[in-house]
């Protein structure tokens, strides 16, 4: 390991949490903040620049984290605007009748979910509505991952039979 890598390793060990808090304050999202900080360290390690141990590298890392957060916020704004435009285009031509039919389909799907066995209903709600991973659901409900996957597969089969137009 060269001096540059040693300096980066020291900053990582001693200041990662400060950099994470800095990113979290800008993004207000734990996972994104962790990703940004780790991405900054990875990009510095992958670059061919030689950083000396005499330089005060911490301010440089703060600036890099800030810039990466700004880039991510800009990207999220673009994605959000594109999603809004897409939804506008998708639903702008709908008639009152189409909206009512769509609402009816949603109501039928919700009723189908309500009629499922309690554990299956909980798995479906956690997986699709709360966007939890199978491992998280299995841990929460204290059941195996395979049981969670089985519940999801059976629920989808039920929904497909009852709401063929959705799938």
Image (cartoon, rainbow, N blue to C red):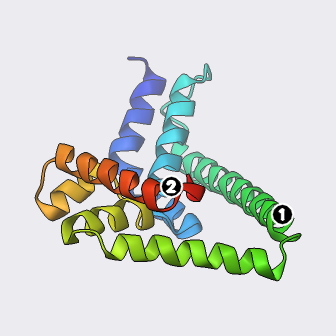
Q: Which residue is at the front of the view, 50 or 159?
A: 159
Between 120 and 115, the one nearer to me in the picture: 115
Q: Which mark is residue 85?
A: 1
Q: Which residue is mark 2?
A: 32
Residue 76's place in the image compared with 5, above or below, is: below
* Residue 7 horizontal side relative to residue 44, left or right: left
Does 68 sit left or right of 118 as displayed?
right
Residue 110 position (above or below residue 83):
below
Which secondary structure, mark 2? helix
Q: Position of residue 14 (x, y in %)?
A: 34, 48
- Residue depicted at 46% across the width and 54% down the height: 160
Q: Residue 14: give its label.
A: none
- Pick whichever of labels 1 and 2 is earlier in the sequence: 2
User: Would residue 151 be found to the left or right of residue 84 on screen?
Assistant: left
Mark 2: few/some/many CA within 10 Å (<14, 14-19, 20+): some
Q: CA distance from mark 1 to mark 2?
A: 25 Å
Q: Position of residue 16 (x, y in %)?
A: 40, 50
1 or 2: mark nearer the eye:
1
Mark 1 nearby-residue class (10 Å; few <14, some 14–19, many ≥20): few
Question: What residue is rendered at 53% in x and 60% in y?
Answer: 23
The N terminus lies in which quarter of the figure? top left
State the residue in front, 121 or 32.
Answer: 121
The residue lying at 49 percent from left, 56 percent from top is 33
């Amino acid at each position: 390991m060269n001096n540059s890598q040693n300096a980066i390793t020291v900053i990582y060990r001693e200041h990662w949490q400060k950099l994470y808090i800095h990113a979290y304050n800008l993004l207000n999202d734990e996972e994104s903040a962790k990703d940004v900080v780790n991405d900054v360290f990875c990009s510095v390690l992958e670059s061919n620049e030689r950083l000396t141990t005499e330089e005060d590298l911490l301010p440089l890392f703060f600036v890099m984290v800030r810039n990466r957060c700004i880039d991510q916020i800009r990207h999220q704004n673009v994605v959000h605007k594109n999603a809004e435009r897409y939804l506008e285009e998708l639903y702008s031509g709908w008639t009152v009748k189409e909206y009512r039919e769509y609402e009816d389909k949603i109501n039928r799907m919700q009723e189908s979910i309500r009629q499922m066995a309690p554990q299956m209903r909980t798995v479906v709600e956690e997986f699709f509505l709360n966007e939890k991973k199978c491992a998280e659901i299995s841990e929460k409900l204290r059941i195996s991952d395979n049981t969670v996957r089985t519940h999801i597969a059976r629920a989808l089969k039920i929904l497909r039979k009852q709401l063929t137009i959705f799938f």
